[in-house]
C-alpha cells in the first residue's frame, strides 16, 4: 500500500508539470527557473490588496502609519519612484502596476512586499541600521523582485499542492491525525523550504540589478547584510535549517552579482 500511495503521489505531481511557467524575463542576471503557478495572478493581487489595506488600517488605528508628508516616507517613495520604472526589464507591464509604498513605525528590522506591488518599510530597519539611500534601494529592489517573480503566488501554489498531496495520502493509506501531520512536515521541507531559499537568492540578484539600473550602487546590498550580520544575536542558524541563506553565503553571492551589474550602475550615472 505504501508503494502504491507513493506512486500515486508521484503521478499527481508529474501531472502538474504542465502548470510550470516563468514570470519574468532574464535580465542581465539571467534567472530562468520555471515556477509552479496553480493560483491565478488576479486572485493573489486581490488578496494582497485586501491584506495590505488591513495592515494600513491597523497601523492608522495605532498611530504607527507615517503620514505621506513625513520626510522618511518621501525619501522611501522617492527611491521606489526611481526603481519601479526599471521593472520593465523583467516584466514590460510592471511599471504600470498599482504600486504602493508606506512606512510603519516599528522597531523591527524588516521590510516586506505583498502580491501586486504593496510594499512596507519599518522605521526600525532604516533607523537602527542607519541606511543610506543606496542601502534602502538595495532592500527596495529585493522586495520589488519578490513581487515581480510572484513568489507569494508560487508559495501559495506549493501549499495548494501540499494539501492535494495530503488528501491523496489520506485516501490511499487511510493515515490521519499525527501521522498525517508528520507527512505534512515532510512535504513542506521537501517542497517549500528549498524554494524559500531560492526565492531569497532570486530576489537578492534581481534586486541588485534593479538598484543598479536606477543609479544606485549595487554593492550597497553587501553593506546591508554586513550590518544585519552585526545585529544578529548569537549568529545565524545553519543554512540548511534556515529559509534564508546564511549571512556569509548571502554576502558572497551579492558581491558576485553586484560586480556583474556594476556596468549598469556606471551607465545609469553617465546618462
Image (spheres, rainbow, N blue to C red):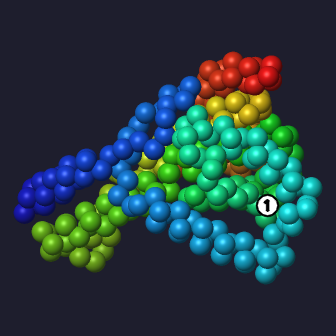
Left or right placement of residue 259 versus residue 268 in this view = left
In this image, 245 relative to 261: left or right?
A: left
Residue at x 7%, y 63% (from the top left corner): 1
| Label 1, residues with CA under 10 Å away: few <14, some 14-19, many ≥20 | many
Question: Looking at the picture, does residue 204 appear above or below residue 125?
Answer: above
Where the C terminus falls, by quadrant?
Answer: top right
Q: Nearer the viewer, residue 226 or 104?
A: 104
Q: Is residue 188 visible?
A: no
The number of numbered badges drawn on the structure is 1
Image location of residue 168, percent across then percent down: 19, 67
SS at circle 1: strand
Extreme residue in the bottom direction: 61
Q: Locate residue 212, reporting x and y percent.
A: 71, 30
Whether residue 151 is visible to the viewer of this picture, yes or no, is yes
Residue labelled with disc 1: 103
Identify which residue is drawn at 92% across, 55% down: 71
Can you give x and y, in whole percent of width and height, for residue 38 in the image? 35, 58
Q: Where 211 falls versus 122 (above or below)?
A: above
Q: Nearer the viewer, residue 136 or 194?
A: 136
Residue at the image position 57 percent from the left and 65 percent from the top: 48
Q: Residue at x 19, y 66 (%)?
A: 169
Asked whether 31 or 247 is in front, the reply is: 31
Relative height, residue 269 to residue 98 (above, below)? above
- Above or below, comparing residue 165 to residue 128 in the picture: below
Q: Position of residue 112 (x, y in %)?
A: 65, 56
Give residue 267's quadrant in the image.
top right
Q: Quadrant of residue 58?
A: bottom right
Amino acid at each position: 500500500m505504501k508503494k502504491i500511495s507513493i506512486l500515486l503521489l508521484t503521478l499527481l505531481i508529474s501531472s502538474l508539470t504542465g502548470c510550470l511557467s516563468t514570470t519574468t524575463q532574464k535580465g542581465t542576471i539571467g534567472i530562468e527557473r520555471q515556477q509552479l503557478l496553480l493560483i491565478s495572478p488576479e486572485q493573489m493581487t486581490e488578496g494582497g490588496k485586501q491584506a495590505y489595506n488591513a495592515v494600513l488600517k491597523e497601523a492608522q488605528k495605532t498611530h504607527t502609519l507615517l503620514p505621506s508628508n513625513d520626510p522618511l516616507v518621501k525619501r522611501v517613495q522617492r527611491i521606489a519612484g526611481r526603481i519601479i520604472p526599471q521593472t520593465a526589464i523583467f516584466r514590460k507591464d510592471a511599471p504600470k502596476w498599482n504600486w504602493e509604498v508606506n512606512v510603519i513605525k516599528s522597531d523591527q528590522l524588516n521590510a516586506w512586499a505583498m502580491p501586486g506591488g504593496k510594499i512596507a518599510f519599518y522605521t526600525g530597519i532604516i533607523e537602527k541600521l542607519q541606511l543610506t539611500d543606496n542601502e534602502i534601494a538595495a532592500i527596495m529592489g529585493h522586495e520589488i523582485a519578490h513581487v515581480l517573480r510572484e513568489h507569494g503566488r508560487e508559495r501559495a501554489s506549493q501549499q495548494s499542492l501540499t494539501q492535494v498531496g495530503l488528501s491523496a495520502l489520506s485516501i490511499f493509506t487511510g493515515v490521519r491525525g499525527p501521522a498525517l501531520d508528520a507527512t505534512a512536515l515532510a512535504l513542506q521541507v521537501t517542497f517549500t523550504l528549498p524554494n524559500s531559499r531560492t526565492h531569497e537568492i532570486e530576489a537578492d540578484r534581481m534586486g541588485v540589478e534593479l538598484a543598479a539600473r536606477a543609479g544606485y550602487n549595487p554593492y550597497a546590498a553587501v553593506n546591508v547584510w554586513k550590518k544585519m550580520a552585526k545585529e544578529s544575536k548569537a549568529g545565524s542558524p545553519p543554512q540548511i535549517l534556515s529559509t534564508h541563506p546564511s549571512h556569509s553565503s548571502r554576502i558572497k553571492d551579492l558581491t558576485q552579482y553586484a560586480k556583474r551589474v556594476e556596468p549598469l550602475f556606471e551607465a545609469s550615472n553617465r546618462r
